[in-house]
Image (tube, rainbow, N blue to C red):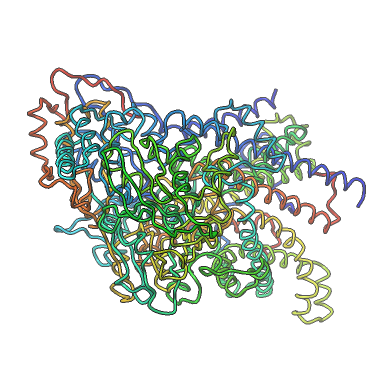
Amino acid sequence: MQKRSVVHGLAFLALGALIAAGAPVAPTQAQPGRQVRELVLVTWPQAQDPQQYEAARIAAEGMRRLGLRVTVRTMPWEQLADYIWYSRQKWDMTTWQMVGRPERSDPDELLVNLFSSSTAKDGYNFIGFIDPKYDEIAQGQREATDLTTRKKLIVQAQEIIAGAQPYTFLVNPKSIYAFNNQVWDPATIVEQKGIGIKNFWTFDGAAPKGAQKDMVLNAQDPVQAINPLYISGKVDSWITELIWDRLVRIGPDGLPRPWAAGAYKWLTPTTIDVTLRPGMRWHDGTPVTADDVIFSFTAPKGGKVPMYRPFVANIADIKKLSATTLRFTLAKPSAAFLTSTLGKINLVPQHVWAPMLQSLEGKKENAESLQEKAPIGSGPFKFAGWTRGQEVVLEANPEHWAAPKMRRWILRTVSNVEAALGGLRNGEINFLSDYLGDPAVLARLSSQDPRITVIASTDIGMQFIAYNERRPPFNDADFRRALSMVIDRNMIRLVAYKGYGVLADSPVSQALEFWHAPNLPQYAYNVAAARDLLKKAGYEWDPQGHLLYPASQTETLEVAR
Amino acid sequence: MTRSSTRWIAQRLAQMLLVLWVVATLLFLIFRLMPGNPLAAYIDPNFTADQQQALIHEFGLDLPLWQQYLIFLRASAAGSMGQSFFYHAPVAQLVWEALPNTLILVLGAVIIAFLIGATAGAFLAWKRGTALETAGISLALAVRAAPEFWVGMILLAVFSFSLRWFPTSGTASPGAQYASLWRQLTSPDFLRHLALPLVTLVLYLQGLPLLLMRSNMLDVMEEEFIVMARMKGLPERRILLRHAARNALLPVVTAFALVVGYSLQGYVVVENVFSWPGLGRLLVKAVAAKDYPLAQGAFLLIAALAIFMNLAADLFYTWLDPRVSYAKR
Amino acid sequence: MRSGSVGALPRPGQTWAGWRRAAGTLWGVLQHDRFAFAGIVIYALFVLIALSAPLLTPYDPQQTIISGDQLMANRPPSRAYPLGTTNVGRDIFAQLVYGARPALAVGFVAAFFVALIGTSIGIVAGYYGGWLDAVLMRLADVAFGIPYLPFVIVLVAFLGPSLWNIVLTMALLLWKDTARVVRAQVLTLRERGFVEAARVLGSSPRRLMLVHLAPNVLPIALLYGSLAVGWAILTEASVSFLGFGDPARISWGYMLQDAYISQALSGGAYNWFIPPGVCIMLVVMAGYFISRGYEELLFPRLRRR
């Protein structure tokens, strides 16, 4: 029937279009013999992270000088995170970063989570680095409450990593922030080690010079939630830090100091007494009690606060010794307890949250789906308003013992980076708190306009290239060391990071001067030396210059998909 | 209205619902069939396997596809669009908050674009054959041919960064508070924030009404009654305004509804450039973050508006032009 | 939609006469209408640029230029770099010139598919009528109802950020205007007994559609095709701007996005931000000009100036 032929024709057309669209996706066969397969380096698209993308490109260029065939493949970050996290057998190498957070001022979290064998299967050790000696040392530093012993162990751990090169460390980036020095007294702007000037101490202590008493900041992404029991986006944490207090805070020097806790004392490696500061009040007027504090640390233990649960898992018991003193008993000694737990858990009012958590019993939702209309905390700022997608307004809490000097703290969502710069110039914004653009542009702006001060600080975080040790040749430490020597890290620092970063050589950032190990091997860019290293390890090259495995090995894997 | 026309309207409404259902199903399938773990963006790597499972269960993603679909249909019919993964808030609430900002920008832009475009189109038709007309048409087409975000960024750079006449982002100044929505919308602060995104959209949209009006005017001016009026000795301008324009306006007016529907898509980039908190920006963020419920909800609302506008355009046209018979459709 | 004048019924035995006549008329339009002519000239110019890109610039668009020991970043326009360099040291003029290739490729391929799909569906729906017509028109309704750019974004997120996925998505949605208009034209032709006469003369449906109907709707196909070139290029630019574009190809949309995320405007680098936009504008405008030429053909009243 003619109609059928027409329908066939249309279907053929559609099919042809689909085939044409799918044509580039053809699987590559495994290479026979000793030739190393084509390796794939995955990274963020240029739009989402121009620095990592550029770093990947330069790294791939370097690796090709070893006779390797390398492809750079981009994926949107959600897909990338998914791929790296859940398909641990499939990928070869990826660019990655560890973001600097105040809690990471203590190297415990990164050293253990990234390289301990316990997190290899489904935790942060997605590269599959297994080293029993390292596990021993990592565990040891966790339990060493004596500072000197602990520091020695931490240095040792870094030396093992530097030798094994499970990552090629690229840079500790510099975080760049700017503020209007006609509005804010520069003497009151605090630079926190490894964090920069955008930190709690600046917000708490910045003194307005003139008529403008509100701090207006910017963020590129909208605020997701204002919830003390939820670690949502990075922007949200700026807000929770201001509305809710914690027992301990990380000071500008990177070390913990008492905050809501007036004092604390270690009795044994697993027992610590904490004394509360008197006179604290919630924003609704009711006093902060020891019961509130106990509630804040026990509520996450239930199933309804999944993100904070790991941080209270080590607390075996909390005893109320008096109206102002609590005794924490830990299951295992943890030298980082002050930073990683007492410095992280938000103090929440029991009379507000107990009924809310109670209402979740038996339902499948957890605390993250709750959102107070007017969040109540005890911190130096009170919640004043939230227009979704636009701005969050906090106002100063005059009754707090560390009451802020500014009147209001206003966070604007500005999705357009150029608009943020423009806003800084014309006074709409007086503190540039989220700037992922070209640092040279900001520097030029500052040199043209003396009202704007730009401060770049080395970050706690780091950027690196991770090698999946489940897939040869990345299980060979010599191979990894050679890779580190052909990646021109200095060019990456100059081109991808525009010079705004220091070369990294350890999971512990150079910003953490106390903990960073000195004299680690540097792996300077040297193609000849890298080839030499491979030759000594048994690798060879075929007449076309392609890298071959040592004599006893053949390529067993297919190209990563 | 006659009985046949009521039936026709009912038919079109039914078709509209059908189209909406197809679009919703298509959306549902696309999101569910996307590669990768849907919750990768939301699961904290610190979670144990149990906790991850609990989260998947909470979002209903462990049910078979057809069951998820039924739940989705049922919820949509009841008016609920689910819970946003990203914001942990009802999608309906988020969409409802963003909608007024979008409507104001889009409707305002279309109305102004039509006013300016139609006037300019009539003017150019009057100046037919002159160099002015050629220049005018070229200019209108040139502006229409430029990418909206490019025009927007340039306007922003010139009028906001350099001249500082307008603010750089948002719908209101930092910390501003208003007694009511009406107060906010009529405040000078809001209008200043609205100005640049509005102008960007107007520049883009003016092309269609301009060209349409011009070509219709040219048609009408050849009509017999115009020739008659000219022979009668009436002044050219009176002919233009009283007779020609009024008749030429008809198709332009009906194109209005169409253009509203059509412009509900182009403004997505404009919202991004000016950080305007409307549906477009919400949708783009939701897609990037794989927030299915929110992306679905925003998309569906935009589609519903567009389809409704289409229907309104059809209705309007048939009402205005009784020569068109229903039977032909 | 008013029906324009169409060619007369071709005599039996003259299979290609209809096509030849249509081609002749279309070519005539190009020669006589100023706008259409200007459009063709612009197209020809860009095609020439795209083809001769390696001759116009010594640099590769992806190449980061290092002179001496310094990275040539953010250089203003000079003899060595006619439009200056980007913030990672790439030559802007090279990117512009090579960027014509994906732009034109996307434009023409999308336009071709849109015209082809739209015309085919329009002819089939108009000719057969009945349930096939109803189904196809409801499909067009769905395509009308789906907001264009959001759908492209969603599908590209789904299929992956490749240039051809963007083209595919456009082909899936943009045929609706062409189809509707072609169908209306076919209905008119049907009404005028055109189709009936041909069938009486013994043409099979396929022959009828190909030989008789298609040439008569060719102007419409070309009108919407040339419009589609513009839509395609603008879509690709918008999608790239939002971050969903193809990272492997330097297109004008990619350049604009690159400039945007590198704060070109705040840095005063107008030489980076303006040229790609101007190129897009010119090519899209050319498409509009050409389509206006064919509009004249369909509405011959306007030919009298």
Regarding residue A497, the answer to whether it shows in the image is no
* Residue farthest toward the right in the current orientation of the protein: B2
Residue A340 quadrant: top left
Q: Is residue B326 above or below residue C260?
A: above
Q: Nearer the viewer, residue C97 or A98?
A: A98
Residue A542 quadrant: top left
- Percent coordinates x, y for residue C55 in the rendering: 29, 53
Q: Nearer the viewer, residue B325 or A253?
A: A253
Tally of marks = 0
- Percent coordinates x, y for residue A446 in the rendering: 30, 71
* Residue farthest toward the top in the current orientation of the protein: A552
Regarding residue A196, the answer to whether it shows in the image is yes
Where, quadrant-wise, is the C terminus of chain B in this rendering?
Answer: top right
Q: Nearer the viewer, residue C70 or A116?
A: A116
- Percent coordinates x, y for residue A132 in the rendering: 20, 27
On the picture, is B132 further left or further right than A463? right
- Percent coordinates x, y for residue A382 in the rendering: 49, 61
On the picture, is B76 further left or further right than B285? right
